Image (spheres, rainbow, N blue to C red):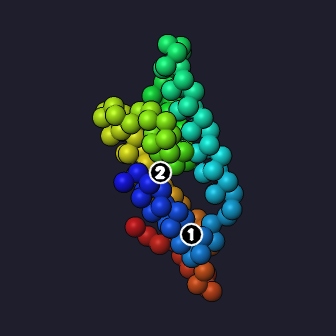
Amino acid sequence: MSYLVILFFVVLYLLATFFFHIPALVALVYGVLSLSCFVAYAIDKSAAKGGRWRTSERTLLLLGLLCGWPGAVLAQQWLRHKSSKRSFRIVFWITVALNIGAFVYFSMHYAAPDIGTEVAPIEL
């Protein structure tokens, strides 16, 4: 299911780019923060194995919320880190939903629609 959420978001991003001309900078932000989040998970996994200082769950969740969640999903699957702690995963998926919701909201309200005329933002 985790990979399907990433696939869903990629399709959503492509549709938003087509219809609302989302700037390429948005993809760059998601890419950089996803890589940063993946690295943070890897560092935390290494620290957990070595008994060293750990990255707080709050930090990992905040990185995910701030557009790094695709990297967190991959780290959870590939590194098998934070993938079994139920309480963390529930909050994590809430942050993913919040991020996707914010992406949709800002795409619909602050991007230029591809309709050919000036159109007011869509009201929810």
Q: SS of the residue at dot 2? A: helix
Tag on residue 14? 1
Residue at x 47% of width, y 51% of height = 99
Q: Amino acid at mark 1?
A: Leu
User: Is residue 52 in view from this perspective?
Assistant: yes
Q: Quadrant of the C terminus?
A: bottom left
What is the x, y in percent for residue 60?
50, 33
Residue extending furthest bottom?
A: 116
What is the x, y in percent for residue 68?
55, 44
**Circle 2 residues within 10 Å: few <14, some 14–19, many ≥20:** some
Q: Quadrant of the N terminus?
A: bottom left
**Front-most of 120 and 17?**
17
Q: Amino acid at mark 2?
A: Asn
Tag on residue 99? 2
In the rendered image, the vertical position of residue 73 relative to residue 17, given as above or below: above
Residue extending furthest left?
A: 86
Q: Earlier in the sequence, mark 1 or mark 2?
A: 1
Q: Tell me how many marks there are.
A: 2
**Front-most of 61 and 76?**
76
In the rendered image, the vertical position of residue 107 relative to residue 62, given as above or below: below
Give how far apart the Cα atoms at labels 1 and 2 are: 16 Å
Residue at x 47% of width, y 45% of height = 73
Residue at x 41% of width, y 51% of height = 2
Residue at x 43% of width, y 48% of height = 96
What is the x, y in percent for residue 63?
54, 38
In the rendered image, the vertical position of residue 76 relative to residue 120, given as above or below: above
**Circle 1 residues within 10 Å: few <14, some 14–19, many ≥20:** some
Badge 1 vs badge 2, beta-carbon distance below 8 Å = no
**Front-most of 45 and 115?**
45
What is the x, y in percent for residue 82?
41, 33
